[in-house]
Image (spheres, rainbow, N blue to C red):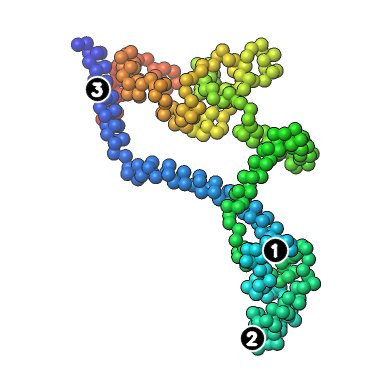
Amino acid sequence: MAPEESKKLTRAAKRQLKRQKKASKKKKKNFFVRGLVVLLPAVLTIFVFATVVQFVNTYLTKPINEAILTVLDGNSLGWQALAMMDVDPRAQQFVDFDALPIDLQADIGQGRRLGELGSQAAQAAIEDFRAPRYRLIRDLEELAIDREKLRSATPVPRWIGILLAAIIVLFLGYLASGFLGRGLIASFDKALTRIPLVRSVYPYTKQLVDFFLSDNELEFDTVVAAPYPSEGVWAIGFVTGGGLKTIHSELGGNFLSVFIPTSPMPMTGFTVFIEAERLIPLDISVDEALRVTVSAGVLVPESEQVSTLDETHERWQALGMDGAPRKGKAGGDAPNDPAADSDRETAGDAG
């Protein structure tokens, strides 16, 4: 066997030994890291759902329930509905003592003229104070009624707010599907775009919402390999539209708009316009393409897998390649010098 072939076999054996050592170290991963791998997906899922529930409760359910309670306790008709729920706003338990006139407060109490707050005399005096203030629209503070105590005793379940919100959304959707409704919504949008500060934000938020929730079909299910950012380099992209008319007319081609996601956060990326003939359609789903992007190419769909990293090294060896091209001091490719390679590996093993 020639000395050069012997050296190549020795280097191959050393590389194989290094790979085996590396594989054994991977098997001895820290238990804490493994625990995080098992626990974090469940924790993050719970966090996402808890955040959604909190958002719905804070900005949807709570305001609607507050509006329902305001309708019930803020007018005479609402008081009649409260009476049907066995809730009497005039009851002694809802009296806000600090909101009563000073002289009436002085007459209520143990050993005083009207007796305790729950006595008949005290209740009669309070009703005399409230009588001229009973109107169609009723101010609880003016009537010396504790709003929080009254609302906590009113049996309005939280799910009422969610139900009413769903009904409102469905009604608006039904309204927007008709000619009259579309006209009203267009007038509303036009009015908002005339407000100085709102017109700087509202049109763009509307476009964003329309992009994700519109019924218009977008070719976002087409996954392609695009020559980006330069020739010879290919990136995963999603065809999002037919491009821009000006680009088509000026360059004389069929330039499609392609979204190139970035790793490992695919919600950000670049919008580019590339000729359709230069795109390579990929037979994978959007979810599979996103997994490839998030994992930086580690999680490749089974239908697109070529080989493992070890198999790639073996192919390099079969082709007479020692591995990735090495760079010299000046940045160029160093010549393939077996003796120099052997000396470097020997020095590395000694270290």
Q: Which mark is residue 295?
A: none
Q: Which residue is mark 2?
A: 110
Q: Nearer the viewer, mark 3 or mark 2?
A: 2
- Corner quadrant of residue 292: top left
The amino acid sitting under disc 3 is: Ala
Q: Secondary structure at mark 2?
A: loop
Q: Of residues 66 and 239, which is closer to you in this image?
A: 66
Query: Which of the marked residues, 2 or 1, is nearer the chain's N terminus?
Result: 1
Label 2 sits on what residue type?
Gln
Q: What residue is rendered at 63% in x and 32% in y? A: 214
Q: CA distance from mark 3 to mark 2?
A: 99 Å
Q: In the image, is 132 to the left or to the right of 293?
A: right
Residue plotted at (42% across, 26% down): 300
Specify the quadrant of the image occupied by residue 97.
bottom right
Using the numbered discs, state the Cα–Cα distance from disc 3 to disc 1 in whole angstroms: 91 Å
Q: Is disc 2 in contact with disc 1, using a CB cutoff of under 8 Å?
A: no
Can residue 189 be seen here? no
Mark 3 and 1 residues: CB-CB less than 8 Å, in contact?
Answer: no
Is 348 left or right of 144, judged from the image as shown? left
In the rendered view, would you say 277 is above or below 31? above
Rendering coords of residue 52 (x, y %): 55, 46
List the residue tagged with mark 3.
13
Sequence-earlier tag: 3 or 1: 3
Foreground residue among 88 and 207: 88
Task: Identify the disc placed on residue 80.
Answer: 1
Q: Secondary structure at mark 3?
A: helix
Badge 1 amino acid: Gln
Q: Give the CA distance from mark 2 to mark 1.
A: 33 Å
Mark with earlier residue (3, 2) = 3
Q: Nearer the viewer, residue 81 or 137?
A: 81
Q: Position of residue 104 (x, y in %)?
A: 73, 80
Mark 3 vs mark 1: in front: 1
